[in-house]
Amino acid sequence: MAQPAQPDEAIAGAPALRRGGAVSAVLLQTVLLFTLSTLPTPVYRDYARAFHFGILTLTLIYATYVAGTLLTLFVLGRLSDQIGRARVSLPAIFCAALAAVLFLLADSAAMLFAARLVTGIAAGLSSGTAVAWLKELQEGTPERTISVRTVAANLFGLGFGPLLCGLAATYLPVPSIAPYAIYLLLLVPLAIAVVLTRETVAGRKPLAEVSLNPGVGVPPERRAQFLAPGVITFVIFALVGFYSAIAPDLLAVVLHITNKAAIGSTVFELFLAGLLADYATRRLGSRAAMLWGAGFVLPALACLVGAQLDSSLPLLLGGTALGGMALGLAYRGTLEVTNALAPEDRRAELVSTLFVCGNLGLAMPVIGIGIVSALTRPEIANLVFAAVVAVLTLAGLAFGLANREK
């Protein structure tokens, strides 16, 4: 069983940050590693024009990111439980830097595929590791406070990516380079802070003894209880995927809003609304937050579909706000429920399983809409996948209500 390491122990014997600094370092890791996953959102249409590819290729580029994340979670999801949090976090930061360099130097669709694959590896390495590390660094802190901070950092990172890219690409010279150059500069203090953050896993194994068996899974006795958070995590990230698939084109093609700062700011609204909902409802119980969040998915979907059918900016902004509320509430609720279920020595493994559910949900609408749009029309594809997400939402609510007393 993993036990906390000595308070003064950091990588290579470096002096450890105090508790507040250590928590801030891992929160910054969460922010910046998730920033990269959404950073290119406002400029994908520019890449498509520059490198002469269509919606199907763009869909496959997105799928490459999800494949990298899922493969890493499956193979290395419990690696930090074995060798330590910092020794997984630093390679994740290195992969994020490499991905940013690949984006910065991209001169073909092949370079974008490589950049998104490495981005997925970085996200897969960091996600479960950072959640587990934050919990262990804040021993004695109320669970609710820990989860609110974790979710807020995650959502801010996801929103900060398109905002940073949109502003940098609009107002700074060399728009294809500026967002990634700024991002690389932000990684330098992060890497230093992680080196100075104390390790929390004792009895760490050498690399030669590491098990690479699938690093995700749910203990048999916890599977019925995990069903609701797993399905609802899938659903809320499917909503994010649906939004990511339709919002940029809806803004640019239907509403004729092509300013990248405006596009980035609109996407940022989704995650800002989630962050605010996360804090505003922090006194709400874990299961209630999870179920209320799932409930908000349905009106959010209705607004987004209506925005496309009626070419309505107010409906798009309303759907964005409702979707953000769904994300903030349900994400915090599912994370708290999962952390409460997890055995101490399998925490990163179980949280990684939750992230697998989320990444599968994120991928389904983006990939599905891209393929169906290529075969039919985007409006039909969007309606089909909105209906699928709505049905899955109702299933998640049913599982959550059925297990509310367990």
Image (cartoon, helix red, strand yellow):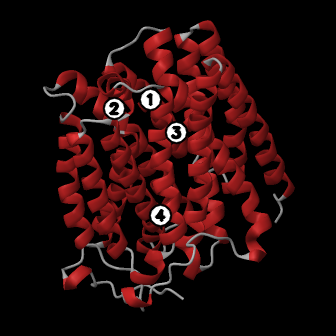
Image coordinates of residue 247 in percent, x first then y, are 50, 23
Image position of 156 (left or right of 236): left
Q: Are marks 2 and 4 in contact (CB under 8 Å)?
A: no
Q: Which residue is mark 3?
A: 274
Using the numbered discs, state the Cα–Cα distance from disc 2 to disc 3 in whole angstroms: 15 Å
Mark 2 or 4 closer to N-term?
4
CB contact under 8 Å: marks 1 and 3: no
The local secondary structure at tag 4 comes to helix
At horizontal 69% and vertical 48% (from top left) the residue drawn is 232
In x, y percent, where is residue 300?
65, 27
| In contact (CB < 8 Å): disc 3 and disc 4 | no
Q: Nearer the viewer, mark 1 or mark 3?
A: 1
Whichever of callouts 1 and 2 sits on the residue coming sooner in the sequence is 2
Q: In the rendered structure, are the residues bearing label 1 and label 2 in contact, judged by CB atoms less than 8 Å apart? A: yes
How far apart, in angstroms, are the residues tagged by discs 1 and 3?
A: 12 Å
Does any portion of residue 239 appear in the rendered image? no
**Distance from Cα at disc 2 to Cα at disc 4:** 27 Å
* Number of the front mark, 3 or 4: 4
Q: Residues within 10 Å of mark 4 (few under 14, many from 20)?
A: many
Residue 347 placement: quadrant: bottom right
Determine the CA span between mark 1 and mark 2: 8 Å
Q: Say which label, 2 or 3, has the lower sequence index.
A: 2
What residue is pinned by disc 2?
Answer: 163
Name the residue tied to disc 4.
72
Q: Which mark is residue 267?
A: 1
